[in-house]
Image (cartoon, rainbow, N blue to C red):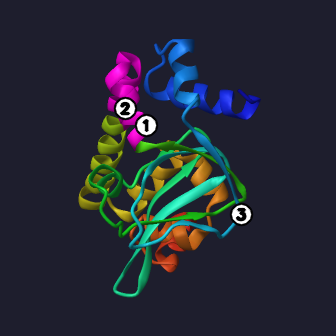
């Protein structure tokens, strides 16, 4: 197993199921494939079916969609994060979410069918799979609650606290759309005017 793959598997597993044994980590690593990405590359297009859980080894990606002709960022993911177009990968239906590389980097693709097969054979892989899905649901719920209940300033401060890498690395236009505000509102929030 190459060093980047080992480091990525360990970081990703440690965030979700740190009790996983070395043997199970190797089993998980045995089914992944490496994908190098270029900045600006669209890794999954609207209308395609997602067949993989994507682990970011190096770089940053975003999931986004178009609504009323506008580009809306759904999630940012970077080193150690897992990117899932959950409805598409689990139901094998075309996605409306797209994945774009915001930086050049490296991804590891975990084939969903092979992960499900391993999860039936290994309790630890099953627990990791479950923890991935739980984490994805929790993140989605927190984001929905943030949109519903927080002010623009509160959403920005939460992002600074929970994902400072996004503030440092993502373009401001994408950050604004992620926070459901215009770039002008984001500028005022950042300046402390709101």
* Circle 2/circle 1 CB separation < 8 Å: yes
Image quarter in which the C terminus is found: bottom left
Q: Residue at image x 72%, y 34%?
A: 4
| Vertical placement of residue 130 versus 41, above or below | above
Looking at the image, is mark 2 or mark 3 earlier in the sequence? 3
Neighbours of disc 3 within 10 Å: few (<14), some (14-19), many (20+): some
Neighbours of disc 1 within 10 Å: few (<14), some (14-19), many (20+): few
Q: Is residue 124 magenta?
A: yes
Please state which of the two labelled residues, at mark 2 or mark 3, is closer to the viewer: 2
Label 2: element kind: helix
How much space separates mark 2 and mark 3, taking CA atoms? 31 Å
Viewer-closest of 40 and 25: 25
Q: Residue at image x 58%, y 21%?
A: 26
What residue is disc 1 on?
114
What range is drawn magenta here? 113-132
In the drawing, what numbered circle is on residue 91?
none
What residue is disc 2 on?
117
Label 3: element kind: loop
* Circle 3/circle 1 CB separation < 8 Å: no
Q: Is residue 25 left or right of residue 86?
A: right
Determine which quarter of the picture holds residue 88: bottom left
Q: Could you tell me what secondary structure mostly forms the magenta stretch?
A: helix
Q: Residue at image x 27%, y 48%?
A: 141
Viewer-closest of 171 and 47: 47
Please state which of the two labelled residues, at mark 3 or mark 1, is closer to the viewer: 1
| Residue 151 drawn at (x, y percent) | 33, 61
Viewer-closest of 73 and 98: 98
Q: Residue at image x 45%, y 71%?
A: 177
| Residue 157 drawn at (x, y percent) | 47, 52
What residue is disc 3 on?
38
* Circle 2/circle 3 CB separation < 8 Å: no
| Vertical placement of residue 49 versus 2, above or below | below
């Amino acid at each position: 197993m190459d060093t980047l793959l080992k480091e990525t598997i360990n970081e990703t597993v440690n965030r979700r199921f740190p009790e996983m044994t070395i043997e199970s980590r190797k089993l998980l690593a045995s089914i992944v494939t490496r994908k190098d990405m270029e900045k600006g590359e669209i890794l999954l297009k609207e209308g395609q079916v997602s067949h993989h859980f994507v682990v970011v080894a190096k770089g940053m990606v975003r999931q986004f969609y178009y609504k009323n002709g506008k580009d809306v960022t759904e999630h940012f993911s970077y080193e150690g994060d897992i990117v899932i177009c959950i409805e598409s990968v689990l139901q094998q239906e075309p996605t409306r979410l797209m994945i774009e590389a915001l930086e050049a980097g490296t991804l590891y693709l975990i084939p969903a069918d092979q992960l499900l097969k391993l999860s039936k054979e290994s309790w630890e892989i099953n627990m990791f799979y479950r923890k991935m899905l739980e984490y994805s649901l929790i993140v989605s719920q927190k984001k929905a609650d943030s949109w519903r209940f927080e002010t623009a300033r509160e959403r920005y401060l939460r992002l600074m606290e929970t994902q400072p890498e996004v503030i440092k690395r993502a373009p401001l236009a994408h950050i604004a759309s992620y926070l459901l505000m215009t770039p002008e509102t984001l500028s005022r929030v950042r300046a402390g005017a709101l």
